[in-house]
Image (spheres, rainbow, N blue to C red):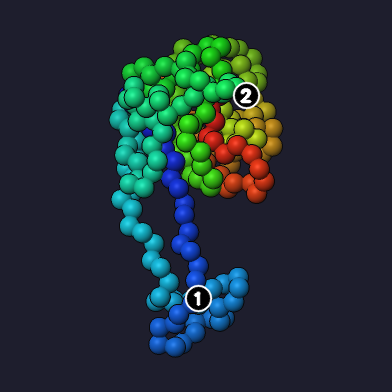
């Protein structure tokens, strides 16, 4: 099994200051407390240059964008970016095998040691190639991603396997179904991107996997 990539891309905004206007002309409404820049304002800070990501294939992982925080890159050293979800946290019992981060039965959830606010999480995962579990529901290759530990983005082997609509892979579990079910067969690499905006209340802001 080839290496997988788990990467976070931080979305940061420049500090807003008093607007300046090239040529003294406004385009659209003048600036106010909510919109400090006019349209096409040449003094507005430009987006930073980021080298784009390359796509993964079933045979080889792609490369993350240059501004990504890579939480798992297929190396054994990357296990140090993750802790068990215990109190207090301790080193995880999950393992790195063949370049992938693999769950060990009854080892519990893990969370990233680094904390984040708003983020885009790129996740590549694979269910076991040997299918275990019959019938309907959540009995095959079941896992999940838990932003802040508050909601679950479902990770599930439901390839040609029925489940409730809000329990499919890619759903916000128990809340909303994915737009479509677009899974490869078991053993193949799946990919998804999760855009998370931090809720404005006190709490834990770590990416969490289970």
Mark 1, residue position: 18
Looking at the image, is 78 positioned above or below residue 97?
Answer: below
**Circle 2 SS class:** loop
What residue appears at the point 56 percent right and 81 percent down from the top-left corner? 30
Instruction: Indicate which disc, 2 or 1, sits on the residue closer to the N terminus.
Output: 1
Name which quarter of the figure residue 173 lies in.
top right
Q: Which of 44 and 193 is in front in this view?
A: 44
Residue 109, how many percent across, how many down? 55, 22
Q: How crowded is mark 1: few (under 14 residues within 10 Å), some or many (20 or more)?
A: few
Taking 121 as reference, is 97 above or below it? above
Determine if residue 160 is in view.
no
Quarter holding the N terminus is top left
Quarter occupied by the C terminus: top right
Q: Mark 2 points at which residue?
A: 162
Question: Within the image, what quadrant is residue 136 found in?
Answer: top right
Distance from disc 2 to disc 1, alpha carbons, whole Å, reads: 56 Å
Residue 172 position within the rendered picture, expressed as x and y whole percent measured from the top left: 63, 36
Identified at 50% across, 67% down, the residue is 16
Give the residue drawn at x 35%, y 41%.
Answer: 64
Q: Where is residue 104 in the image (x, y as percent from the top left)?
A: 49, 13
For label 2, the crowd category at 10 Å Cα-Cα, with few meaning under 14, some 14 to 19 and many 20 or more, is some
Measuring from the top left, give residue 38's x and y in whole percent: 50, 77
**167 on left or right of 28:** right
* Image vertical order of residue 21 relative to residue 135, above or below: below
Drawn side of residue 134 relative to residue 54, left or right? right
Residue closer to the observer: 170 or 203:
203
């Amino acid at each position: 099994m080839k290496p997988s990539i788990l990467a976070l891309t931080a979305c940061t905004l420049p500090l807003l200051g008093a607007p300046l206007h090239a040529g003294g002309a406004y385009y659209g409404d003048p600036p106010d407390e909510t919109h400090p820049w006019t349209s096409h304002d040449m003094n507005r800070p430009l987006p930073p240059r980021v080298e784009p990501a390359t796509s993964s294939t079933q045979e080889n992982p792609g490369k993350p964008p240059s501004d990504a925080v890579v939480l798992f890159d297929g190396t054994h050293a990357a296990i140090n970016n993750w802790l068990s979800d215990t109190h207090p946290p301790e080193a995880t019992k999950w393992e790195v095998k063949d370049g992938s981060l693999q769950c060990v039965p009854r080892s519990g959830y893990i969370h990233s040691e680094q904390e984040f606010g708003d983020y885009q999480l790129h996740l590549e995962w694979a269910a076991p190639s040997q299918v275990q579990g019959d019938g309907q529901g959540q009995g095959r290759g079941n896992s999940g991603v838990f932003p802040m530990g508050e909601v679950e983005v479902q990770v599930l082997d439901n390839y040609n396997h029925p489940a409730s609509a809000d329990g499919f892979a890619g759903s916000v579990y128990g809340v909303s179904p994915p737009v479509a079910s677009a899974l490869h067969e078991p053993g193949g690499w799946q990919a998804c991107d999760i855009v998370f905006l931090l809720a404005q209340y006190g709490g834990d802001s770590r990416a969490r996997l289970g």
